[in-house]
Image (cartoon, rainbow, N blue to C red):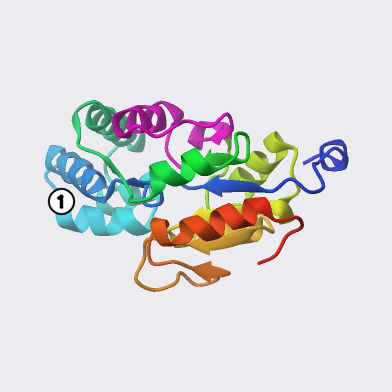
């Protein structure tokens, strides 16, 4: 991030940066179905492949479960299945998501996802959620979560200081990404807190009032 961008950063405006899958959109069953379908193509055990996929990025997953296969071919097959799932799968927004996003001031929130923008837009269209102006996807960065790069890029696009940004996440890699970016990080949609979060909420609806209060306050507080 350049010094010019930091010098021009809004000194008081606070921003909320949401992860997508697992935070705003309930996509767990969709991800399980996609990975099982992918595993069937290669004669692999779907449950085992999914267990590996939960803790690794796709290319790392392929290296573990199908090391003899061309990883680019594997990735193309996965993308094909994911795109088909966006078109035909059943998606739900988490309770409170639509109300929260509608209540947030325009321009105060964005999305930071390890998925691709066209899939996010497809899922949001299916669930009726609004799409913000700032959306950082997998294609926008060379290094994804848990690197701080995606969240820092979102702050840069807002012209906001990292310390004035709130990250809302459900997964360890996203939490670590936000922490490394120097942002306030709150966890949602998990029975127990992910290590490192500054606050933990069992679900998104519970977190909603606190998120709105964060945006309304002046100065960063964790």
Task: Examine the structure image and report whether residue 47 is included in the region drawn in magenta.
Answer: no
Task: Left or right? Give the position of 78 relative to 23.
Answer: left
Task: Left or right? Give the position of 71 relative to 156.
Answer: left
**Vertical relation: 187 (above or below) 46:** below
Task: Left or right? Give the position of 119 relative to 145.
Answer: left
Counting labels gives: 1
Location of the N terminus by quadrant is top right
Residue at 76% from the left image edge and 57% from the top image edge: 219
Residue 20 in view in this figure = no
Tell me the residue that label 1 is attached to: 46
Location of the C terminus by quadrant is bottom right
**Vertical relation: 27 (above or below) 136:** below
Residue 186 in view in this figure = yes
Can you give x and y, in whole percent of width and height, for residue 169 in the image? 48, 56
Element carrying mark 1: helix
Residue nearest the observer in this picture, 25 or 177: 25
Can you give x and y, in whole percent of width and height, for residue 126 in the image? 29, 30
Residue nearest the observer in this picture, 13 or 39: 13
Residue nearest the observer in this picture, 166 or 86: 166
Residue at 73% from the left image edge and 56% from the top image edge: 163
Task: Left or right? Give the position of 216 relative to 122.
Answer: right
Residue at 21% from the left image edge and 41% from the top image edge: 34
Mark 1 surroundings within 10 Å by alpha-carbon count, few (fewer than 14), some (14 through 19), many (20 or more) = some
**Vertical relation: 5 (above or below) 220:** above
Can you give x and y, in whole percent of width and height, for residue 157 in the image? 68, 34
Q: Which residues are magenta?
A: 113-140
Can you give x and y, in whole percent of width and height, for residue 113 in the image? 48, 42
């Amino acid at each position: 991030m350049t010094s010019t961008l930091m010098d021009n950063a809004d000194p008081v405006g606070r921003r909320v940066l949401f992860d997508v899958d697992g935070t705003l959109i309930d996509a767990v069953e969709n991800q399980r179905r996609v990975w099982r379908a992918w595993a069937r193509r290669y004669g692999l055990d779907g449950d085992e492949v999914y267990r590996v996929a939960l803790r690794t990025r796709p290319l790392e997953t392929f290296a573990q479960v199908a090391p003899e296969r061309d990883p680019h071919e594997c990735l193309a097959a996965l993308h094909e299945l994911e795109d088909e799932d966006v078109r035909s799968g059943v998606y739900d927004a988490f309770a409170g998501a639509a109300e929260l996003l509608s209540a947030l001031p325009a321009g105060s929130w964005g999305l930071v996802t390890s998925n691709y923008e066209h899939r996010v837009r497809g899922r949001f269209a299916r669930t009726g959620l609004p799409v913000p102006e700032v959306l950082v996807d997998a294609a926008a960065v060379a290094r994804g979560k848990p690197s701080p790069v995606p969240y820092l890029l979102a702050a840069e696009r807002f012209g906001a200081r990292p310390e004035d940004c709130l990250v809302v996440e459900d997964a360890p890699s996203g939490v670590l990404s936000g922490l490394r970016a120097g942002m306030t990080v709150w966890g949602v949609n998990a029975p127990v807190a992910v290590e490192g979060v500054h606050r933990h909420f069992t679900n998104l609806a519970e977190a909603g009032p606190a998120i709105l209060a964060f945006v309304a306050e002046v100065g960063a507080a964790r």
